[in-house]
């Protein structure tokens, strides 16, 4: 059965390259064979740059994984197309193929050079997570307590100018507040849940969620067990849907999306793989959400955002 799915974040490309696995026919969360053809599936594939890389090493790490991404896109051109704008996304679906959007997780990839924003844009990067958990040249992640740096502010301005969407997942509270003061375009949290439901610094406060909502951004639900429940033990899908219901109560109907964190996190059995995402759709419908709202969360909100901003 075909389905509509727009997922804002997975780490599959970096994991495939690291483990020498192909994008199709693998034993990972994301396998191109997992969804039937005819599905409209758009996936943001993030090149994850760990905090330990800086400068030329960070650039080299990005370039190595980017070359692998290009190779996998070429090998699977019958099944998936890399897209850099909305017209290309539509074309991929018109051809009965999946759509891949290139992202970076960890602004260390920029190596502290504004020119690198232009370079990764030319590579096709359309989403950039400013930090991971630690510090880099742009600012500080959720495990630290500094805000955006001066270079981080300059990089955000250049990203907005070049059409790279700013992603605040992993950014700490001070950095989020700094971004709110300088951002002129909508920004998104590709893979972050509700801190009111699960008190983890990687999750969004209600105030942060509302700031993204008021700016017309997006928030993607993360399937990582520690962001779903504080004890990390989630045996029922209602643990995740609780985050969705909370955000809907805050007026999130038009900004809620999915950001699985596939192949970058330990995920409860009920969602442990692309072929199980349908379990979430079924659960939300069973809990009383309308087909219209569920379709917005699974596909339409992200599709509309990319139509407007890519």
Image (cartoon, rainbow, N blue to C red):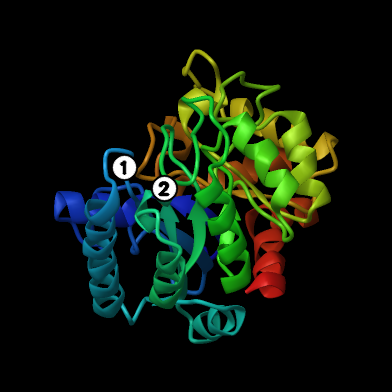
Q: Position of residue 103 (x, y in %)?
A: 45, 60
Would you identify the image quadrant in which residue 248 lies?
top right
161 vs 106, left or right, is right
The answer to whether residue 234 is above or below residue 140 is: above
> Can the viewer see residue 222 in this picture?
yes
Please name the residue that numbered disc 1 is placed on. 50
Q: Distance between the residues labelled 1 and 2?
A: 7 Å
- Quadrant in which residue 185 is drawn: bottom right
Which of 32/302 is in front? Answer: 302
What residue is at 18 percent from the left and 56 percent from the top?
Answer: 21
Which element is circle 1 on? loop
Marks 1 and 2, the one that precedes in the sequence:
1
Q: Bin the neighbour count of mark 2 within 10 Å (Cα to Cα): few under 14, some 14-19, many 20 and up.
A: many
Q: Name the residue under label 2.
A: 106
x then y, percent, for residue 281: 63, 47
In screen coordinates, is 106 left or right of 239?
left
Q: In terms of secondary structure, where does tag 2 sit?
A: loop
121 lies left or right of 60? right
Query: Is there any visible trace of residue 245 in the rendered image?
Result: no
Is 230 displayed left or right of 255 in the figure?
A: left
Q: Of residues 210 and 281, which is closer to you in this image?
A: 210
Q: Which residue is drawn at 65% across and 61% down?
A: 302
Q: Could you tell me if the residues under marks 1 and 2 are in contact, i.e. CB atoms within 8 Å? A: yes
């Amino acid at each position: 059965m075909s389905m509509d799915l727009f997922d804002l974040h997975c780490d599959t490309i970096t994991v495939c390259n690291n483990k020498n696995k192909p994008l199709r026919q693998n034993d990972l969360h994301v396998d191109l064979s997992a969804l039937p053809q005819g599905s409209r599936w758009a996936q943001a594939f993030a090149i994850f740059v760990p905090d330990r890389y800086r400068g030329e090493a960070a650039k080299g790490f990005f370039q190595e994984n980017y070359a692998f991404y290009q190779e996998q896109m070429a090998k699977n051109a019958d099944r998936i197309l890399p897209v850099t704008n909305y017209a290309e996304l539509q074309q991929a679906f018109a051809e009965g193929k999946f759509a891949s959007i290139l992202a970076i997780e960890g602004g260390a990839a920029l190596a502290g050079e504004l020119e690198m924003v232009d370079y990764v844009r030319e590579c096709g990067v359309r989403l950039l997570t400013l930090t991971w958990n630690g510090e880099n040249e742009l600012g500080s992640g959720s495990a630290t307590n500094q805000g955006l740096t001066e270079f981080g502010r300059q990089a955000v301005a250049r990203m907005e100018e070049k059409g790279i969407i700013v992603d605040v997942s992993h950014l700490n509270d001070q950095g989020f507040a700094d971004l709110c003061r300088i951002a002129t375009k909508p920004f998104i949290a590709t893979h972050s849940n509700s801190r009111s439901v699960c008190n983890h610094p990687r999750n969004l406060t209600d105030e942060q969620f509302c700031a993204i909502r008021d700016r017309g951004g997006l928030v993607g639900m993360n399937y990582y067990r520690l962001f779903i429940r504080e004890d990390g033990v989630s045996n029922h899908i209602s643990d995740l849907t609780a985050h969705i219901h909370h955000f809907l109560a805050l007026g999130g109907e038009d900004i809620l999306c999915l950001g699985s964190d596939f192949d970058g996190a330990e995920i409860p059995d009920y969602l442990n793989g692309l072929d199980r995402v349908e379990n979430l759709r079924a659960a939300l419908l069973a809990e009383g959400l309308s087909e219209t709202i569920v379709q917005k969360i699974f596909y339409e909100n992200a599709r509309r955002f990319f139509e407007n901003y890519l």
